[in-house]
Image: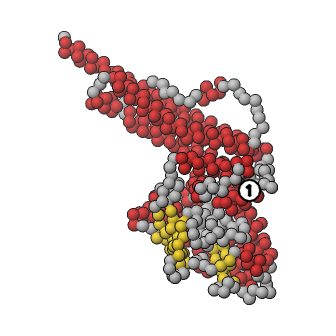
């Protein structure tokens, strides 16, 4: 009959779990930072597009004057 | 503009805490596998969402393509997003690599001996030397006394990776020759198609690189998954009968299969001298000191082998945990009588990137092979000064 996993102690298991949690927490922190940075990049782009739009409208208005 | 995605770290923290349950090995593996899957998908989702957001801004702007291009250039949109994409991939890869390394270590630590033996038997090289192996299709080369082992591009390795792996096999084989000498090693040579030569040459040029760079854990996991896939899942036990490593590999393997890692082209070949021989298990069954004229010669070979293994295993670990394995054999003559020589047939997969695993493999070899060999051939253990 197959023996169940018995070699690993509860303490070791806890250490492994803590290490997993640490890796995953670190990933989440980095992920959040990169996500925030992407939002900033998009926001810059959106502003630049709005500025261009405004310049275009002003240009057209100038033509009508 | 906000990008919608999974809940932030702060939001997660605010979620009500579950009552603390006792951790189990399988529970951890389940949980970590689920996390790994989410992590694997997260960058792609975020990148897609960003692309959609950029598209939305462009479409709603009413600007010409040239004006959009100017806005993109002014804000360095593509460069900055490209850099962010790269960093996303990097943290994802790093995290998944760390998780895999830990799962591997956990599996090595956690499974029982029976499970481990079953696992090695299941993932092991085919018993029949001529036929279809996990990585190679093996053909006879007429009456030359040579075998041609063709490395297949398999489920996980693209042409470049497969050639790199073959080149690494050559490096490993050469290393075994260096430690054990020609007497133990069948003649061999590696042949690469011209189109793969550049990759091979580059890999060979890195021969002196650190062992951890040769077989890193993700590659090791890939190899194991691939071996698992090679069985086509046919010999699977019922889920409740499987060990955690089998189940973890199965899950990862199924995912790789789903993503279509199938190839059949050959990456290169290894030509190896055919060896007539029997396993040590068969040798011990059929022969003893009294009925084997080559006993003393074999005893000398065993002593030399143990001496070389001791040095080799200070840095590496040859996998030989069972006497019925054909990785290492007793050479026989045409009539099936032992010649007194030992031949190492499996010259690969001796790298262990994690030190605890190398130690464990070697501890088991000591217990399962070296000790019984010393006892059977009445050889004294060499003590370090």
> Residue B253, image x and y in percent?
59, 50
> Residue B339, image x and y in percent?
67, 85
Q: Is residue B315 left or right of residue B59?
A: right
Q: Where on the picture, by quarter, is residue B381?
A: bottom right
Q: Where on the picture, by quarter, is residue B31?
A: top right
Q: Quadrant of the C terminus of chain A?
A: top left
> Residue B304, image x and y in percent?
69, 78
Q: Is residue B175 left or right of residue A38?
A: right
Q: Where on the picture, by quarter, is residue B273?
A: bottom right
Residue depicted at 62% across the width and 80% down the height: B276
Residue depicted at 35% across the width and 22% down the height: B60
Identify whether B383 is placed above or below B71.
below
Q: Nearer the viewer, residue B128 or B38?
A: B128
Dot 1: what SS?
helix
The residue carrying pointer 1 sits among few (fewer than 14), some (14 to 19) or many (20 or more) residues within 10 Å by Cα, namely many
Q: Quadrant of the N terminus of chain A?
A: bottom right
Q: Nearer the viewer, residue B318 or B251?
A: B251
Identify whether B198 is placed above or below A9.
below
> Residue B184, image x and y in percent?
63, 78
The residue labelled by disc 1 is B115
Q: Chain of mark 1?
A: B
Q: Is residue B242 visible?
A: yes
Residue depicted at 54% across the width and 70% down the height: B138
């Amino acid at each position: 009959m197959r023996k169940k996993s018995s070699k690993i102690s509860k303490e070791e298991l806890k250490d492994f779990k803590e290490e997993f949690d640490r890796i995953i927490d670190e990933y989440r922190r980095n992920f959040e930072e990169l996500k925030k940075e992407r939002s900033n990049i998009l926001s810059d782009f959106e502003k630049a597009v709005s500025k261009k739009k405004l310049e275009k409208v002003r240009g057209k208005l100038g033509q009508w004057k | 503009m906000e990008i919608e995605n999974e809940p932030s770290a702060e939001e997660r923290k605010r979620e009500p805490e579950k009552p603390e349950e006792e951790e189990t090995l399988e529970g951890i593996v389940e949980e970590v596998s689920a996390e790994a899957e989410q992590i694997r998908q997260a960058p792609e989702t975020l990148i897609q969402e960003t692309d959609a957001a950029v598209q939305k801004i462009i479409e709603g702007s009413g600007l010409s393509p040239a004006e959009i291009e100017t806005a993109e250039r002014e804000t360095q949109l593509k460069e900055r997003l490209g850099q962010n994409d790269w960093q996303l991939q990097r943290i994802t890869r790093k995290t998944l690599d760390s998780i895999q390394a830990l799962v591997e270590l956990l599996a090595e630590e956690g499974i029982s001996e029976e499970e481990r033996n079953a696992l090695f038997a299941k993932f092991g090289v085919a018993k029949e030397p001529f036929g279809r192996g996990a990585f190679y299709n093996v053909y006879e080369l007429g009456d030359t006394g040579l075998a041609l082992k063709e490395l297949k591009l398999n489920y996980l390795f693209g042409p470049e990776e497969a050639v790199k792996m073959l080149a690494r096999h050559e490096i490993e084989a050469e290393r075994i020759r260096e430690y054990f000498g020609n007497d133990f090693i069948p003649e061999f040579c590696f042949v690469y198609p011209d189109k793969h030569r550049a990759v091979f040459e580059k890999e060979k040029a890195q021969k002196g690189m650190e062992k951890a760079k040769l077989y890193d854990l993700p590659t090791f996991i890939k190899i194991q998954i691939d071996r698992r896939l090679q069985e086509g899942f046919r010999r699977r036990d019922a889920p409740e009968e499987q060990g955690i490593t089998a189940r973890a590999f199965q899950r990862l393997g199924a995912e790789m299969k789903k993503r279509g890692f199938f190839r059949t082209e050959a990456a290169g070949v290894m030509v190896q001298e055919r060896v007539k021989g029997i396993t040590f298990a068969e040798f011990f069954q059929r022969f003893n000191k009294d009925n084997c004229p080559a006993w003393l010669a074999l005893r000398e070979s065993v002593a030399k082998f143990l001496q070389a293994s001791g040095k080799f295993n200070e840095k590496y670990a040859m996998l030989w945990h069972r006497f019925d394995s054909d990785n290492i054999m007793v050479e026989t003559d045409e009539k099936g009588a032992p010649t007194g020589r030992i031949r190492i047939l499996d010259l690969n997969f001796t790298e262990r990137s994690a030190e605890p695993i190398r130690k464990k493999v070697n501890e088991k070899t000591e217990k399962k092979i070296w000790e019984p060999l010393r006892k059977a051939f009445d050889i004294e253990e060499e003590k370090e000064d």
